[in-house]
Amino acid sequence: MVELALPKNSRVQKGQHHPAPAGAKKVKTFKVYRYDPEGTENPRWDTYDVDVEACGPMVLDALIYIKNTMDPTLAFRRSCREGVCGSCAMNIGGRNTLACTHGWEEVPGQTCTISPLPHMPVIKDLVPDMTLFYAQYASIEPWLHTKTPEPQGEWLQTPA
Ligand code: FES
């Protein structure tokens, strides 16, 4: 008989709760996936009550606020902060999207759930391992191919 077992990191546990600072007027809860594959613990959902009047309008602003003022151990990627590089891609409120262009007010309800992109191994928290993605990307060679010999310098465009 075949014996099946779920991988050890498949059960996400309840995590820590980080309350809003005293005097916070407008609070939204961010439920964030936390996981360190190098550790011994299963993944967990940590919740952060963020004073959203103290941070910017995007989910990335809330994550930066959390990292700077509530929990410096939270890991996520970001770079351009304007929807160009794609490094802040994650799952927000059940949608795969960019944290820097997705407003926390777009997520209905009191709680905004944030997890890493699905179907990718996690390096830490919201940071997925992109190794396979880049290997697949290179395998399809998504650039212009030519039949003429390569020039010594750059490819010059003809006026025509
Ligand atoms: Fe570059 Fe969000 S930080 S797309």
Image (tube, grey):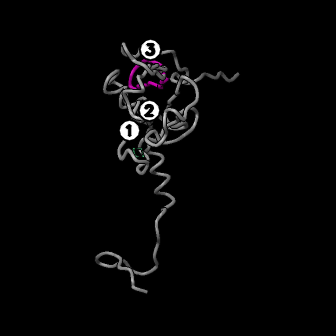
Residue at the disc numbered 3: 17
For residue 142, above or below residue 122: below
Q: Is tag 1's residue or tag 3's residue first in the polypeptide sequence?
A: 3
Q: Chief secondary structure of the magenta span?
A: loop
Residue 77, numbered circle: 1
Q: Which mark is residue 127?
A: none
Q: Earlier in the sequence, mark 2 or mark 3?
A: 3
Ligand 1 neighbours mark 1 (CB distance < 8 Å): yes
Ligand 1 closer than 8 Å to label 2 CB: no
Residue at left offset 40%, top offset 30% = 63
Q: How far is disc 2 from disc 1 in space, using C-alphas?
A: 8 Å
Q: Secondary structure at mark 1?
A: loop
Quadrant where the C terminus sits is bottom left
> What crowding class fits label 1: few (fewer than 14 Cα within 10 Å), some (14-19), or many (20 or more)?
some
Disc nearer the start of the sequence (2/1): 1
Asked whether disc 2 touches disc 1, contact meaning CB atoms under 8 Å apart, the reply is yes
For mark 2, what is the residue?
126
Q: Looking at the picture, how far across and down is residue 83, in whole percent?
A: 44, 48
Q: Amino acid at mark 2?
A: Leu
Residue 37 shows up from this direction: no
Quadrant of ligand 1 in image: top left
Q: Amino acid at mark 3?
A: His
Q: Residues within 10 Å of mark 2 (few under 14, many from 20)?
A: many
Q: Position of residue 16 (x, y in %)?
A: 43, 14
Q: Quarter of the image holding residue 66?
A: top left
- Judging depth in this view, the residue of 19 and 96 nearest the camera is 19
Q: Residue at x 46, y 51 (%)?
A: 135
